[in-house]
Amino acid sequence: MENVLDILLWYKKNFRELPWRSTQDPYKIWLSEIILQQTQVVQGLSYFDKFVVKYPEIKNLASASEEEILKMWQGLGYYTRARNLHKTARIISDEYQGIFPDNYMILSKLPGIGDYTASAILSFAFGKPYPVLDGNVFRLISRLYDIHLPVNEAKNRQVFKNVLDELIVGTVPSEFNNAIMELGALVCRPENPRCKECPVSMHCLALKNGTVDMLPVKLKKNKPSIRHFNYFYIRENNHFYLVKREDKDIWKNLYQLPLIESDSQIDEKSMPQLLASSWAVGCDYSLKRQSQARHLLSHQTILATFWELHSKDVPDFVNETYKRVNLKNYTKYPVPVLIQNFLLSL
DNA sequence: AAGACGGGGGC
DNA sequence: GCCCCAGTCTT
């Protein structure tokens, strides 16, 4: 297609210099792709650099602890990515002698590697003609061909794949994939697309039909639910307590202050009852409501209240799941941004 | 097929 | 306030 040549030419003149673009090391390609899942380049950049310095090869990642990797990942979100990064590093080190497989079926079975990431690794590291289909590409193809199928419906995926499978023929796969994503990110943007700068605007059916603003079509998502978190900053002799989140829930395997979740906001008068019924608190303590915070996630709104609980000795409800940490020395624990912000505000 | 899963940035 | 981002996994 004449489309493709124009896009490739545009890319060669306008691409951003990014660290993962100057390597074909499958390890670094993989690492960058995991970091960039649902994450903008500017947000992931510093994390990539940090990880490459600390873990230059996959074996370094494999021999690290999950907790250390979560700490490195702190603030980036979607922590399943970090846990899967660790799992896959160990699998490749243990079962593949540290050599990345160059096979779609094998790659896409590894934890955290789906269709997009497998295709990215195969094209960028091994030069194989697997087109990537990410948010940028969905948008670009939707507009270029004026396709009004919802992009977040699984059954429509193949329609876009078919288009890409034709377009990628005869190109250098890595250049093709970089080019379509870059064009989507820099020119064919969600809002205020820069059609005047677009190398294929003369072929763009959405532009011709005046439907650019309606595309891509997306099924709307549910509005976030609200949760009430009561966090306890339990002070005792220059220490406080952290607890690991083990549940299948947000922030799995990160640490937080001891938590009582409630159905509604709890005021200062009723909190002692809740403490008694939740943790059977019997010892002497003093309680003060410290601060409140609203923490927005894509699917939940957390309304957090921080309570300061002072006790002269170790409180009687503290058990072995509580990590007693020094006021000055908690920074090795991975914590959600919500907790990090609170601790930094002290 | 639909939800769950974070956090930051743009407007 | 709403939408988006180099998606994947579980139900």
Image (cartoon, coloured by chain):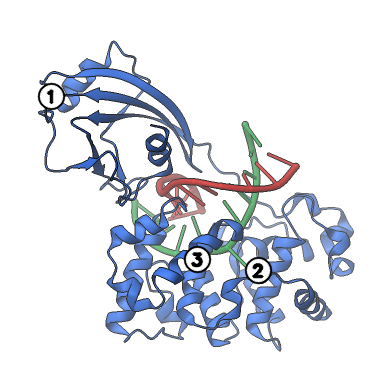
Chain colours: A blue, B red, C green
- At a point 58% along the width and 72% down the height, the residue shown is A19
Q: Chain of mark 2?
A: A
Q: Which residue is mark 2?
A: A160
Q: Could you tell me which quadrant the N terminus of chain A lies in? A: bottom right
Looking at marks 2 and 3 on the same chain, the residue that comes earlier in the sequence is marked by 3
Q: Depth-wise, is mark 3 or mark 1 nearer the camera?
A: 3
Q: Pointer 3: residues within 10 angstroms few (<14), some, or many (20+)?
A: many
Chain bearing tag 3 is: A
Which of the 4 image quarters holds residue A174? bottom right
- Residue at mark 1: chain: A
| Of callouts 3 and 1, the N-terminal one | 3
Q: Is residue A303 above or below residue A72?
A: above
Verify CB contact (< 8 Å) between mark 2 and mark 1. Answer: no
- Name the amino acid type tagged 3: Phe
x then y, percent, for residue A66: 29, 61
Task: Check whether the beta carbons of the residues at disc 2 and disc 3 lie within 8 A of each other.
Answer: no
- CA gap, disc 2 and disc 3: 29 Å
Residue at 28%, 30% (x, y): give it. Answer: A233
Which residue position is annotated with label 1?
Answer: A280
| Residue A21 visible to an observer of this rendering | yes
Q: Which residue is mark 3?
A: A48
Q: Position of residue A211 (x, y in %)?
A: 82, 53
